[in-house]
Image (tube, rainbow, N blue to C red):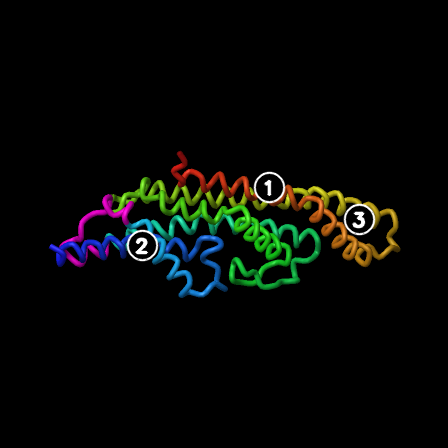
C-alpha cells in the first residue's frame, strides 16, 4: 500500500513544483536575476510542500505512459510561465515610460543597468522599476502575486486542455495595458515637453543669434527632474492601480 501511495505523492508534489517554480522564475520580487537560483528553487519547493495537501486531491493520477507524463508536465510549466509573464510584462510599462521620459528630458543616451529587466535601460526607467519593486515588497503585493499563482489551480485545472486562444488574448490585453501605463506614466513629461519645445522654437525664431541648444539641454534636464519630483506619487499610483487590476482576476478573494 505504501509502495503504491508514495509514487503518487511524489508525482503530485513535483507537478505542483513545476507550476510554482516556473512562475517564480518571472514574478517580480521572486524572479530577479540578482536573487540566487538556489534560494528561488528552495522557495518554490517549500511553497509546493505547504500547498500540497490542499492541491493534491484535484490533481490527475500518475499517467501510465511517458508521453502523457511529459505532456502533463509541459502543460503545468506553460501555465506557470504564462502567469509569471503577465506580471513581468506589466513591469515593462515602467521601462517604456522611463524611456519616453528620458527621451523628452535629454537623458536617453545615458544608459544604466536595469536590475529588474537584467539589461541596460534608461536612468528614468531603472529608477522607476526599482522604486516600483520596492513598493510592491513594502505593500506585500508579492504575496498577492504568489496567491494568484496558487489560486490559479481553480482556473487552470492540471491535465485539462489549455485554451491557447484565451491565453493569447490575455497576453495581448496585458501588452496593451503595459503600453497604456507607459504613456500614462510619461504623460506629464509629454505635455510639458511639447510646450517647452514650442517655446524654444519661438525663441529661436525671435532671437536667431541666441544659441538655443546651449540653453535648452540643461534647462530640459532641470525641468524634467522637477516634474519627476512632483509627479512621482501619481506615477506610482497609476502603475500600482493597473498592476492590481491585472492581478486580482487570478486571486480567489472571498
Residue 59 disc label: none
The foreground one among 144 and 244 is 144
- Indicate the position of residue 140 as horizontal and vertical percent values: 50, 47
For image coordinates 49% across by 38% down, the residue present is 245
Disc 2: CA contacts within 10 A as few (<14), some (14-19) or many (>=20): some
Q: Which residue is mark 1?
A: 237
- Mark closest to the chain's N terminus, 3 or 2: 2
**Figure disc tally:** 3
Q: Which residue is mark 3?
A: 200
- Indicate the position of residue 81 as horizontal and vertical percent values: 37, 53
Range of residues picked out in magenta: 53-71
Q: Secondary structure at mark 2?
A: helix
- Mark closest to the chain's N terminus, 2 or 1: 2
Q: Secondary structure at mark 3?
A: helix
Distance in Å between CA atoms under marks 1 and 3: 32 Å
**Mark 2 or 1, closer to the camera:** 2
The quarter of the rendered structure image containing the C terminus is top left
Q: Is residue 123 left or right of residue 67?
A: right
For image coordinates 38% across by 49% down, the residue present is 82
Disc 1: CA contacts within 10 A as few (<14), some (14-19) or many (>=20): some
Answer with the quarter of the image where residue 215 lies. bottom right
Q: Is residue 191 left or right of residue 38?
A: right
Disc 3: CA contacts within 10 A as few (<14), some (14-19) or many (>=20): some
- Indicate the position of residue 62 as horizontal and vertical percent values: 18, 53
User: Residues at badges 2 and 1 in contact (C-beta under 8 Å)?
Assistant: no
Q: Is residue 131 above or below residue 247?
A: below
Residue extending farthest to the left is: 1
Q: Which residue is mark 2?
A: 49
Predominant SS along the magenta part: helix
Q: Quick check: is 54 in the magenta stretch?
A: yes
Answer with the quarter of the image where residue 25 lies. bottom left
Q: Is residue 217 above or below residue 38?
A: above
Amino acid at each position: 500500500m505504501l509502495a503504491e501511495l508514495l509514487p503518487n505523492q511524489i508525482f503530485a508534489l513535483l507537478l505542483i513544483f513545476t507550476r510554482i517554480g516556473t512562475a517564480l522564475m518571472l514574478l517580480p520580487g521572486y524572479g530577479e536575476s540578482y536573487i540566487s537560483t538556489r534560494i528561488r528553487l528552495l522557495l518554490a519547493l517549500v511553497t509546493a510542500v505547504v500547498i500540497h495537501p490542499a492541491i493534491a486531491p484535484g490533481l490527475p493520477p500518475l499517467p501510465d505512459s511517458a508521453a502523457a507524463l511529459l505532456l502533463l508536465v509541459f502543460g503545468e510549466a506553460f501555465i506557470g510561465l504564462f502567469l509569471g509573464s503577465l506580471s513581468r510584462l506589466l513591469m515593462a510599462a515602467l521601462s517604456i515610460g522611463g524611456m519616453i521620459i528620458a527621451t523628452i528630458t535629454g537623458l536617453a543616451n545615458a544608459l544604466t543597468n536595469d536590475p529588474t529587466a537584467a539589461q541596460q535601460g534608461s536612468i528614468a526607467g531603472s529608477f522607476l522599476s526599482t522604486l516600483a519593486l520596492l513598493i510592491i515588497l513594502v505593500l506585500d503585493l508579492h504575496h498577492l502575486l504568489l496567491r494568484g499563482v496558487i489560486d490559479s489551480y481553480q482556473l487552470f485545472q492540471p491535465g485539462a486542455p489549455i485554451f491557447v486562444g484565451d491565453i493569447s488574448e490575455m497576453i495581448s490585453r496585458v501588452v496593451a495595458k503595459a503600453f497604456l501605463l507607459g504613456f500614462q506614466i510619461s504623460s506629464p513629461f509629454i505635455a510639458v515637453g511639447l510646450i517647452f519645445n514650442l517655446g524654444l522654437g519661438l525663441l529661436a525664431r525671435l532671437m536667431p543669434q541666441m544659441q538655443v541648444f546651449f540653453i535648452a539641454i540643461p534647462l530640459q534636464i532641470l525641468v524634467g527632474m522637477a516634474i519627476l519630483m512632483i509627479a512621482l506619487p501619481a506615477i506610482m499610483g497609476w502603475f500600482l492601480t493597473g498592476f492590481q487590476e491585472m492581478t486580482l482576476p487570478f486571486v480567489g478573494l472571498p
